[in-house]
Amino acid sequence: MSRTLFQNANVVLADSVRTGSVLVEDGKIMDVDAGSHVQADEVVDCSGRHLLPGVIDDQVHFRDPGLTHKEDLETASRACAAGGVTSFLEMPNTKPPAITLAGVRDKEAIAAKKSRVNYGFYIGATPDNVAELQQATDVPGIKIFIGSSTGNLLVDEQAALERIFAETDLPICAHCEDEATVRANAERLAGTTDITDHSRIRDENAAVIATKRATELARRHKHRFHVLHVSTAAELPLLADASPYITAEICLHHVFFNVDDYPRLGSRIQMNPSIKTKADNEGLWQGLLDGTIQVIATDHAPHTLEEKSQPYPQSPSGLPAVENSLALMLDQAGEGRCTLNQVASWMSDAPARVWGMVGKGRIEAGYDADLVVVDMNEKRTIRDAQQHTKSRWSPWDGETLQGWPVATYVHGHCVWNTIRGFDESFRGTKLRFDHSRGGYWNTVDGIGT
């Protein structure tokens, strides 16, 4: 039995920040208001620092297997640990794609050997794999690409979508961009080499049409559905109608970058869905603040700088973000744009509830001790060369932020801190999912244990 006491911390709870001590025993939180007299094997002095629940990133592309020259589960999970991310959910468009339960199991086996943090893997939908989707139970959910993707992962035929929503039980998430709209725009702009045209090809209409289509399917079939990477303010009215079935998220590049940044950053901010306007930045932020959007994720999708440096449209879409996401939001909290309670809700509690991650997302007795020690006074400048992701670059290169993680704990074990670096011996575990609890809207008090 091992005990750790996080002493004199500003503990970020679900609805408050309380100065005190948190006791962890054998990887579980035992007491969030422990006395100073409590016996422990290790005491972590958190004086002047905050203790947050570990970040859960529910949308990443870690490229393992098949594209490991860009990233793999070892380098990506190190980036997670350094960024305060203690759990991730990875998308199915690897090579081969995870469109069978056996394919998901293969990725879990790789993660068991490589990942320093906790992991889960979506199963991907195709036009004809409903039988496989029905067999999957202990996975976070089903991912549909309603828009261009690799291989046979594109599902935009109405009949196939109807079958998936009608004949499966797992929660569904989707990349929502209307394929017909994207193709028509691409044909109209054929031959362009202007990177700014990426946002004209993957325009507001493409996002709105697909999001409307998917949310209508979810409501009609009464099937839990999560809208990934909302990129336009025009989508928000589709999400504002209260529904026990619909949740949504934003990714930080859609809040921090807009089309005015293309001249400065070029293909570094080329993403699908595309970067939109400054008005969309502001609208999406307001959607977070008013609760229309529940989750923040990264859509971490690295490519090498050599690949990204190709002229448009040969340059691929995607950017790395997982090791800077928490710091970006801590900086916003420090500037007064949001609170630390909101950051913890958007990045930890909400994704745990959406995907039914048992024992995750809060600092509360009985929960897993996935924790991040944060110094809100620390300033660092993001540098390409200092990134832990294999791609070794960031679209935020040169940005100075205040508020950074200084130590990350998974199941009570310190997997990284600024003094010792990484614990090379520790590995995270497969996440547990309980979809019977009903998701975000039915777990207001947290997902529990």
Image (cartoon, rainbow, N blue to C red):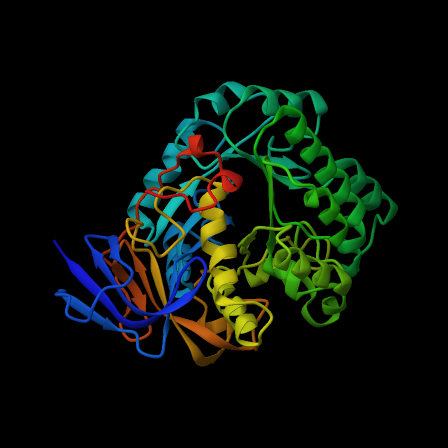
- Of 111 and 42, which appears nearest the observer? 42
Q: Locate the C terminus by quadrant.
A: top left
Q: Is residue 75 visible?
A: yes
Splitting the image into 4 quarters, where does residue 430 fall?
top left
Residue occupying the point 44% across, 33% down: 435
391 and 433: which one is in front?
A: 433
Looking at the picture, how far across and down is residue 102, in whole percent? Answer: 40, 28
Instruction: Estimate the x, y position of residue 244 in percent, counting from the top left.
Output: 59, 36
Q: Please state the horizontal and vertical placement of residue 308, each as a whole percent of the image.
A: 62, 60
Give the residue at x 70% y 41%: 241
Q: Residue at x 49, y 56 (%)?
A: 345
Query: Can residue 310 be seen by looking at this rendering?
Result: no
User: Compared with residue 313, is residue 209 higher up or lower down, i.e. above or below?
Assistant: above
Report the number of numbered marks. Answer: 0
Is 96 positioned to the left or the right of 34 in the image?
right
Where is residue 283 drawn, in percent x and y? 72, 59
Residue beneath the point at 62% across and 59% down: 289
Q: In the picture provided, is 368 more to the left or to the right than 60?
A: left
The quadrant holding residue 336 is bottom right
* 260 vs 11, nearest the viewer: 11
Task: Say above or below: 145 vs 52.
Answer: above
